[in-house]
Image: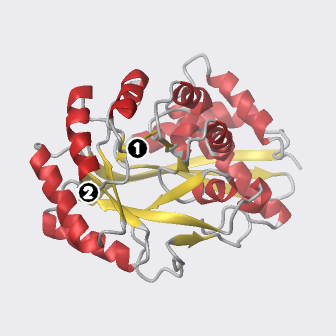
Amino acid sequence: MKISRVTAAAESRPRVAVLHDALQALDTHGVCRVTVETSDGVRGSASISFGRLGAAPAILAHLINDELAPAIVGEDPFLIRAIREKLWRLTDYHGTVGLGLMGIAGIDIALWDLLGIAVGQPVWRLLGACRDRVPTYAMVGWLNYDIEALKEVCATAMGQGFVGVKIKVGAPTLAEDARRIEAVRSVIGEDALLMVDANQVFGFNEALRRGRVYQDLGCYWFEEPLRADDTDGLARLREALAIPIASGENNYGRRQFRELFERRAVDIVQPDLRRAGGITECMEIGLMADAFDVPYASHGSGPHLHVLAALPNTLFMESGLLPKGSSVRLVDGCYPLPEDSGIGSG
């Protein structure tokens, strides 16, 4: 079996209901779909999504179709790590991190999907699962929601069986952040988890000031309090606060994550499957994190569920609300693993 064809196709449209965090407005539904086909007729697929930058999916598709795809046609699809290394070397000249790594991630995820389909097994079984379900919380508390809407969506999430909720912080004043946290706590109860996410907008002093209040309000973790590349600042903040510091969504590749771990900059690591480099890279990041006794909580869900099932240090999967009509039912706050071959419904 050899790779016979790799294709990427893009689409993008404006989001009717724009979502806001402290950093940005998410105004786009964008996706780049990647398909890998083999000489035996087996096909695997993946999707790389974009919440803004409407032209980005098409740019990524162009990079995959014209640069990455020709380099791996004829390769054995089972040699996933060899393909990953080849594409890292290929893209080194213009910089692998960024769109280059998102393209590698799309191919990597599609290859894992293909392998699962080829052998008739879900990917989590191929990775060597540690569990048959994954604890899950809901990221539902966007900063543009007023307090009543925030309370309603968080109550809905708890009604669906999540272990807790995450809300955005970084409002113009700390008092407003505190009011929003207290409002959510009033509807989710004292025992549910409540995480807060600042999306990189604070400087060190403001993160320290607000972090002290978040921890006094019983928040479970403080996510992306500083720029993702401010490793020194994250390490200092972690030493100064009792609330766990979570970060990693905007780090690229295992070597950037190695620096986070070596500097003891995070209590919880949160790779994004697209930016980190795909299933292969995230498995290696997760195992490295385990060696440093750092729990792993995903940014996003989808195929990341398979990685979380296989890591010994999995803490939580991030999810949105379960869509209306979904067949998924959470059990004790946990998301079940798909039984379909490949990525399946994960």
**Residue in front for this viewpoint, 81 or 219:** 219
Q: Where is residue 321 in the image (x, y as percent from the top left)?
A: 39, 70
Q: Quadrant of residue 218?
A: bottom left
Q: Earlier in the sequence, mark 2 or mark 1?
A: 2
Query: Can you give x and y, in whole percent of width and height, for residue 226 in the image?
Result: 32, 32
Nearer to me, 206 or 230: 206
> Is 153 left, or right, of 345 in this rendering?
left
Can I make out residue 107 in this image? yes
Question: Mark 1 Cα within 10 Å, few/some/many (few <14, many 20+)?
Answer: some
Image x and y of residue 221, in percent:
37, 49
Q: Indicate whether 314 appears above or below 260.
A: below
Res. 229 in view? no
Q: In this view, does 184 lie to the left or right of 162?
A: left
Where disc 1 sits, the SS reads loop
Q: Mark 2 points at which residue?
A: 142
The kind of residue on which mark 2 rests is Trp
Seen in the image, is 344 located left or right of residue 185?
A: right
**Which residue is pictured at 21% across the width and 53% down the height?**
143
Q: Mark 1 points at which residue?
A: 244
Q: How far apart are marks 2 and 1 (CA)?
A: 21 Å
